[in-house]
Each structure stands twice: as C-alpha cells, then as structure tokens.
Image (cartoon, helix red, strand yellow):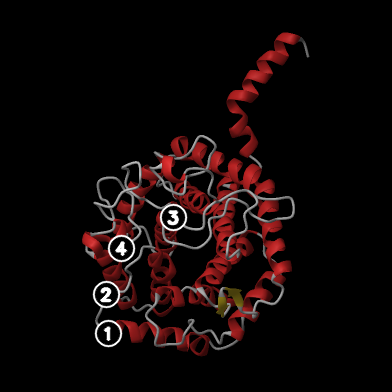
Amino acid sequence: MNTMKKAVWSFVCLVFGTCLYAQNPEEVLNDARLANQYFMEKYADPTTPTFVKKERPSSLWTRGVYYEGLMALNEIYPQSNYIDYALRWAEFHQWTPRNGIQTTDADDQCCAQTYIQLIPYTDKDKKILTENILANLEYQMASGRIDYWTWIDAIQMAMPLYFQIYKLTGERRYADYAMKCYRWTRNECGGGLFNKKTGFWWRDKEFVPPYQESDGQPCYWSRGDGWVYAALVRVMSLLPAKDAYYKELKKDYLLMSQAFASCQREDGFWNASLVSPVTYGGPEATGTSLFLYGMSWGIQQSLLPSSTYKPLCDKAWKALHEKSIHPNGFLGYVQGTGKQPSDSQPVTYTSVPDFEDFGLGCFLLGATEYFKLLKQ
C-alpha cells in the first residue's frame, strides 16, 4: 500500500472507527459471558445471603436486577447452568417476594420479575409458583393506595411485575393499578417527578426544584433515570403497540430518549449527574448500560431513528468494552448503591461497588439488547 493510500485509509479509520469497531456482535456476547462468568464463579451459591454492612437475603433488589440480566443473556445464549443457577435461587426463596406477601416495598418485589420468567423452565404447577406473588400484589392493591412509589427506582423494581401478571392471568386490573401508581409518581409525587419539558426525571421529592447541584444545574441522576427507561422498555415489550398503555408510555419513552441523547459524553459514557458534569462527571457504567438497553430496543422497534441513535449505541458499547470490563470480567466504573450522583464516589475503573450484582444486571441488559440490534 503506497503512502497516499495509507493516509486515506488512516483517515477513514479515524472518522469511521467507532462505527466499524462496533459491528461485532460476537465481541458483545463474549463480554457478556465473561462478566457473567466472573460473577457466577465468585458467587457460586446463589442462596448465600449478601453481607454489606449487614446480612441481607439474596432475594434483595440488587440480586433481582442481576437475574433480569441473566435471563436476557440466556435469551441470546441459552445455557442450562444459567437456568439452574436461577432456579436454585428462586426455589430457595420459595418463589416469594423478599419480606413476604405483606410487603409494599417495590424493592422487595423486584425478584418476582425473574420468578415469572422462570416458570416455563420448571414442570411445577404455575398456580403454586405464583401463589405468593399474587397474594403480595393483591395485598398491596387492596390497600387502595397508589402512592407507594416515592422514588423513581421503584418503577423499575415493581411496575414490570404487574404487567407480567396481567399477561399471565389476563386480568387487566393489575396493569390498571400499575399505571395509576406510575402516574402518581410521574405527576403528583413531590409535584411530579417527571420533567415534561425536558424528558428527565428527578429521583425523588428531595431533588425537585429548588434543589440544584453546586453549579446551579438540576440534579438528574443517571441510574435513576435509567431505571425508568428500562422499566418502560420491559412494560412496553409485554404490550401490543395498539394498547392504550403502550401509547401512553411511548410518549414518555420518546421524550426521555431525546433527553438522554442530548447529554452523552464524547467518550460514550453518561455522567452520574446527567446535566451537571462539573459536580459528578466521569464515566459511569450502570446508567450507560441502561441507556444502551433502552435505545437499542427502540431502534429495533422502529421507535427511534437508527441514523440518530445507532451511533450513540455504538459509542456506548465501545466505552463499556474498552473502559469498563476488565480482562477477568470485573466491571469498572460502576457506581454503588445510593440515590444521587454524589453517592458511592469515587467511581473509577478499579473501585469495587458495595454490591456487584445490580451493576452486572444493567450491563447484561444493555449488552444483550445491543447484540440483538447488531444481529437484526
């Protein structure tokens, strides 16, 4: 190759490198498998409680999110050991929400989303497997209250479960109740946690105006907004496009997509504080993974224009592949638990979050949906 051709080729690679680099679904699958293998080897017994400051059962929400990711990975790469691992966990917890059937905490209900997904993999009577889940939802619905979801993470933890039960039973009242709860969080909690003008969400009533970051910007927490984005995808995936609830959620989904597209970092990540990089900027993998999940799904559903959003997905994946995942499968730049950008800082390539499971769940959701996009 002569000097001129080399120069031209170098320029092409520079301009289109991100796009060319990203067109490798096997790389995406390999990273997802590697990250999951790291976790399953480190936490070989899925029934063992976690111990972060205090002992918690492995049915807590952080583990529930991991299993959502594992089931997504199994969808594109079916493995009996994935299902066996998840079934051991579900059976140990007796297919019951954390803290029993009289809980109204969305975090306690998160694990049941995977219980429902596991039903086809067992020959047990689904009525028995869903008995405690149904009892729990009935207990909450019977209260007559719709104001339980006071923080936006709760939308991801619980809302998809109500729609899973609606699809399983055919009883619309479960979906009706979930939508009432969603609207209350969206429109009434703290004056409404959804900013209808911008498409961002405030995490809870503590962060609505006049609260602001130190640079005067609103506080929109990356992972919190990502939770809602993922929840809408999971719910809309269960509904026909003509369904009234699908159409209602679609409007929010599209507005949120535009908001997230407007604040992606040049390196492909999103900041922990979405519009305030001065306060808590820097790579963050969980929000990035959830945005990758939501955008990849939307492109496949022809809800988002590929010409606009596919490059954002490519950049996000490139960032996760090159800067987050370690050679052994450990994930860097994962912000630990909290409720705002300042929590669990600093977030670095080598920092270990307080819980490793939910970050992996987010990563697997993003990776698997991006894999499907590339294979489409």
Please rate how many residues cluster around mark 4, counting C-alpha atoms within 10 Å: few if below 14, some from 14 to 19, many from 20: some
Question: Which residue in the structure is indicated by mark 1?
Answer: 143
Question: Which numbered disc, 2 or 3, marks the residue that appears first in the sequence?
Answer: 2
Question: Which residue in the structure is indicated by mark 2?
Answer: 146
Question: Which numbered disc, 3 or 1, marks the residue that appears first in the sequence?
Answer: 1
Question: Which numbered disc, 1 or 4, marks the residue that appears first in the sequence?
Answer: 1
Q: Amino acid at mark 2?
A: Ile
Q: Amino acid at mark 4?
A: Tyr
| Nearer-the-camera pick, 286 or 354 | 354
CA gap between label 2 and label 3 equals 22 Å
Question: Which residue in the structure is indicated by mark 4?
Answer: 245
Q: Secondary structure at mark 2?
A: loop
Question: Which numbered disc, 4 or 3, marks the residue that appears first in the sequence?
Answer: 3
User: How far from the left and from the top, in percent, is residue 90?
Assistant: 58, 81
| Nearer-the-camera pick, 170 or 50 | 50
Question: Which numbered disc, 2 or 4, marks the residue that appears first in the sequence?
Answer: 2
| Nearer-the-camera pick, 87 or 145 | 145
CA gap between label 4 and label 3 equals 20 Å
Please rate how many residues cluster around mark 3, counting C-alpha atoms within 10 Å: few if below 14, some from 14 to 19, many from 20: many
Q: Amino acid at mark 1?
A: Ser
User: How far from the left and from the top, in percent, is residue 338?
Assistant: 46, 62
